[in-house]
């Protein structure tokens, strides 16, 4: 009897990616749970963070429940296609990952705490998948919005990589990039409105997130940093 291993998803390149469209996807202006603007003007003390950690439904809920988070939304980032649809992203031909965009009050919660929620909330050793969700859109991804965020993300990733290794897990495969490095003109495209705050609209809906059980030793209670 011959056994075959499932083919690992591979990233599409710019030449073979879908073109997309100019018209952005419309979403409700107000966050269903937090009652604040989904797309506010970003001015101090508000800052932006972005994470891909598998299916974005459960990821968004993790962050809207975190004290200090002003608003959240889900969408697509890290790829090539402008204003993609969910079906296009699932085809693997956009290069995008499913992501949650987090608007946070930097005087109430710091970036390291967001990173702790990110690393502990999924398995960053799974390549192009999370559990039974397989595809490039489910890859582990951090999109940093400035050099400070990128530096902190890489530092925390190194620390957590050591913890994972000590616990017997494989290599950490989280992709860390910057908002200015993506190929499209924007680092983030909103997902369809029915995806926004999905698990508030559908309390018994699917959530495939599952962490490793390894603690990320950052973001403990204390005075928030400026990042």
Image (cartoon, rainbow, N blue to C red):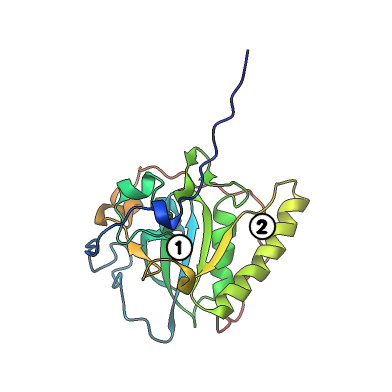
Q: Residue at x 69, y 51 (%)?
A: 171
Are there few (<14), some (14-19), or many (20+) residues within 10 Å of tag 2?
some
Seen in the picture, residue 97 relative to 2 is either above or below; the reply is below
Give the structural element (helix, strand or loop) at label 1.
Answer: helix
Q: Residue at x 34, y 47 (%)?
A: 203
Q: Position of residue 130 (x, y in %)?
A: 52, 45
Q: Residue at x 25, y 68 (%)?
A: 30
The residue carrying mark 1 is 63
Q: Position of residue 116 (x, y in %)?
A: 59, 64
Q: Sequence order check: which comes first, mark 1 or mark 2?
A: 1
Seen in the picture, residue 159 relative to 91 is either above or below; the reply is below
The residue carrying mark 2 is 215
Indicate the quadrant where residue 61 lies.
bottom left
Q: Where is residue 187 in the image (x, y as percent from the top left)?
A: 40, 68
Q: Position of residue 192 (x, y in %)?
A: 27, 55
Of 95 and 49, nearer the camera is: 95
Indicate the quadrant where residue 224 lies.
bottom right
Residue 67 in sight from this viewpoint:
no
Indicate the quadrant where residue 191 lies.
bottom left
| Residue placed furthest toward the bottom | 44
Of 39 and 206, nearer the camera is: 39
Quadrant including the C terminus: bottom right
| Residue 196 placement, left or right of 132 | left
């Amino acid at each position: 009897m011959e056994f075959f291993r499932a083919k690992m998803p591979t990233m599409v390149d710019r030449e073979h990616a879908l073109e997309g469209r100019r018209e952005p996807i419309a979403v409700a202006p107000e966050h269903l749970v937090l009652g604040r603007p989904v797309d506010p003007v970003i001015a101090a003390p508000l800052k932006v963070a972005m994470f891909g950690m598998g299916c974005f439904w459960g990821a968004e809920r993790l962050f809207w429940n975190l004290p200090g988070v002003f608003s959240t939304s889900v969408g697509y980032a890290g790829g090539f296609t402008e204003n993609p649809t969910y079906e296009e992203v699932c085809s693997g031909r956009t290069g995008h990952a499913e992501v949650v965009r987090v608007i946070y009050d930097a005087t109430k919660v710091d970036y390291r705490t967001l990173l702790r929620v990110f690393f502990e909330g999924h398995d960053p050793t799974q390549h192009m998948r999370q559990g039974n969700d397989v595809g490039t859109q489910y890859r582990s991804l951090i999109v940093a919005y400035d050099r400070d965020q990128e530096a902190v993300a890489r530092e925390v990733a190194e620390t957590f990589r050591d913890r994972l290794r000590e616990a017997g897990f494989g290599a950490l495969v989280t992709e860390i990039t910057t908002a200015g490095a993506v190929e499209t003109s924007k680092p983030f495209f909103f997902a369809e409105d029915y995806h926004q705050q999905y698990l508030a609209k559908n309390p018994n809906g699917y959530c495939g997130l599952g962490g490793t059980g390894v603690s990320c030793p950052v973001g403990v209670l204390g005075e928030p940093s400026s990042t």
